[in-house]
Image: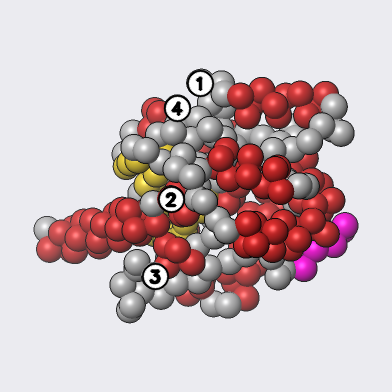
Amino acid sequence: MWLPVVKYFPKDQHLVCVDMPGHEGTSRTGAEDYSIQGQVDRIHQFVQSIGLDKRPFHLVGTSMGGNVAGVYAACYPGYLCSATLICPAGLVYPTDNEFVSRLRELEKNPEEAIPLIPCTHQDMEAMLRLICHSPLNLPRQLMRGLLDNRLPNNPFYKEVFMEIIGEKSRSSLQDKMHLITMPLQVIWGKEDQVLDVSGAAVLQAALPNCQVAILDQCGHSVALERPRKAANLIVDFLSAQVNSEDTKKLS
């Protein structure tokens, strides 16, 4: 997810990229709490275990990870200097879209197919069209490899997905955003078909000092479609925070 973005950060930047609990190479057990709050608390355990809690750091999250990052900022404000949320989940979006309508149907009928959990080559193509505004045009062999890698984990992915769209987690960022006190940056693809860009206005209304960047001709997967732009926006935001702190020290 983050590799396309990471290469555009300055080489002297200390970066830690975390696979969300239960994703990719991390462990997954039925005993884990995969609600947003459960994931927030587990991320905090990770922060403490590797010593990131020695001084405030900047946290970035996208989609579900954006929800987690936002709730982390609300729950553990003393550990962060600032945060960036990219197309975050967990809000009540003023504008509905087809994907959100599908989620409502999914709640009524859990056996419905989930657009973000592909089971066939056609499903994979449909998912990429959903998350990206510009076609990725991946080679068929690579698509097959991606699908083969995901298929054994689909039951787990569905379990986590149903957890985060359930009543306990679906609006967790909305419920806690008023507790965010540190500088906040919001980045959103204008053509996002998964989580409507109107969510940016929700955060800006609640947190007037947050900085919002809307990317034209970009969908939900900002890290894939606009990695250089995303990295530049984050670096510029961090530089502005450092300059602001330096100005305060001089005044």
The answer to whether the residues at label 1 and label 4 have Cβ atoms under 8 Å apart is yes
Number of the front mark, 1 or 2: 2
Expressed as whole percent of the image width and height from the top left, the position of residue 68 reads 59, 50
Measured in 3D between alpha carbons, the distance from the residue under mark 2 to the one under mark 3, in whole angstroms, is 14 Å
Q: Which residue is mark 1?
A: 94
Measured in 3D between alpha carbons, the distance from the residue under mark 3 to the one under mark 4, in whole angstroms, is 30 Å
Q: Which mark is residue 225?
A: 2
Mark 2 surroundings: few (<14), some (14-19) or many (≥20) residues within 10 A: many
The answer to whether the residues at label 3 and label 4 have Cβ atoms under 8 Å apart is no
Residue numbers of the magenta segment: 27-32
Q: Which mark is residue 7?
A: 3
State whether residue 2 appears in this view.
yes
Expressed as whole percent of the image width and height from the top left, the position of residue 72 reads 56, 52
Q: Which mark is residue 198?
A: 4
Left or right of 79 on screen, residue 119: right
- Tag 1: amino acid: Pro
Q: Quadrant of residue 91?
A: top right
Expressed as whole percent of the image width and height from the top left, the position of residue 58 reads 42, 61
Mark 3 surroundings: few (<14), some (14-19) or many (≥20) residues within 10 A: few
Number of the front mark, 2 or 4: 2
Outermost residue on the left side: it is: 251
- Tag 3: amino acid: Lys
- Tag 4: amino acid: Ser
Q: Quadrant of residue 149?
A: bottom right
Measured in 3D between alpha carbons, the distance from the residue under mark 1 to the one under mark 4, in whole angstroms, is 6 Å
| Disc with the residue nearer the chain's start (1 vs 4) | 1
| Disc with the residue nearer the chain's start (2 vs 4) | 4
The answer to whether the residues at label 1 and label 2 have Cβ atoms under 8 Å apart is no
Measured in 3D between alpha carbons, the distance from the residue under mark 1 to the one under mark 2, in whole angstroms, is 25 Å
The answer to whether the residues at label 2 and label 4 have Cβ atoms under 8 Å apart is no
